[in-house]
Image (spheres, grey):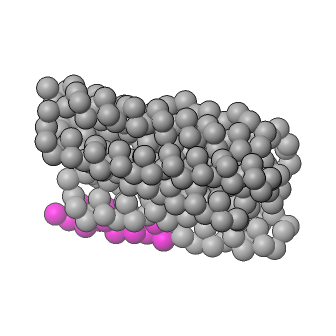
Amino acid sequence: MSEKIIALLNEDVKGEHMAIVQYLRHAYALGEGEMACEIEAIAREEMRHLDWLSEKVVELGGKPTLEREEMDLGGATPAEWLRRDVKAEEDATTMYREHIEAIDDPKIKRLLRRILSDEEAHHRAFSHMVEKSEREKIAPEGALLSEKRDENIDMLNWGIRHEYTVILQYLYHSYLTPDEEVSLELQDQAINEMQHLGWLAEEMTETDGSPEIEETGVDRSEETGDMLRADIAVEREVTKEYTHQIDEVEDPGLKRLLTRIRDHEIYHGQLFTDLLEDLEKE
């Protein structure tokens, strides 16, 4: 029975993961307006759902999936994008109702009903945004899909892919490690990496580029020491790359942004090193 529930919950995880990325892509393309902020807020709620569901999978003896459902990124206008978000919420509410019916565990049913309530609210919010975008003829500030290429776009997308990958990696490690301190620190740094992704994606909208929110390979270590070694290695690698980019880029604003992110990465590496040293002393 646990295996069946784990499989159903991982289907939900995949749906939440897809929604997070799809909604963020739409928010970034809309720029800094009120609607973009509303969509980002919905994406944050989906992140909370993903966290709850992944933790429940681990409690049941499983491993949370890192896969996501296929995104629907078609459309040339915000109204068309938002209709796809409405459809995503319709699919989510249907799936949650099916899973609530299929699962007998009262605590899990209670969690899924809690999430379903949010998804129904998201559906109403996106439906309202479709009407508003059509009525006010809202236009995008960035690109949703773009083949435009220049050095800065390539560099920003390297950073976006990296940040997205380590967000997944740190969350995955945080779910699986039995060390509570390490788990909390990993979650905290994943939140910081999420900030980095947002800053880089916002910078991308100013260049008419499209953020490539794709992972490049997540470490799936299961021992806490191995997790931290992998996390230290990736922080050292990204610190070198950001330092190189800082030396190469000419735009002063972008240089300051990359410097700030690079300094955060240095801190992450030092923090993970301290955690590993403490672990090895025990």
For the C terminus, which image quadrant? bottom left
The percent coordinates of residue 116 (x first, y second) are 35, 44
Which residue is rendered at x = 17% and y = 38% of the image?
60
Could you say which quadrant of the image residue 244 lies in? Answer: bottom right
Is any part of residue 36 visible from this angle? yes
Q: Judge left or right: residue 13 versus residue 234.
A: left
Percent x, y for residue 149?
85, 44
Q: Which residues are magenta?
A: 267-282
Q: Position of residue 54 (x, y in %)?
A: 31, 44
Q: Is residue 71 left or right of residue 147?
A: left
Query: Where in the figure is residue 75, as x and y percent of width and height?
Result: 74, 36
Name the chief secondary structure element in magenta: helix
| Whether residue 240 can be seen here | no
Magenta span has 12?
no
Image quarter of the N terminus: top left
Q: Residue 85 falls in which quadrant of the image?
A: top right
Q: Residue at x 66, y 36 (%)?
A: 73
Residue 268 magenta: yes
Q: In terms of depth relative to the viewer, which is nearer, 116 or 208?
A: 116
Q: What residue is at 46 percent from the left and 62 percent from the top?
A: 191
Q: Quadrant of residue 156?
A: bottom right
| Residue closer to the observer: 62 or 15 | 15
**Residue 250, above or below 123:** below
**In this view, 103 is above or below 117:** above
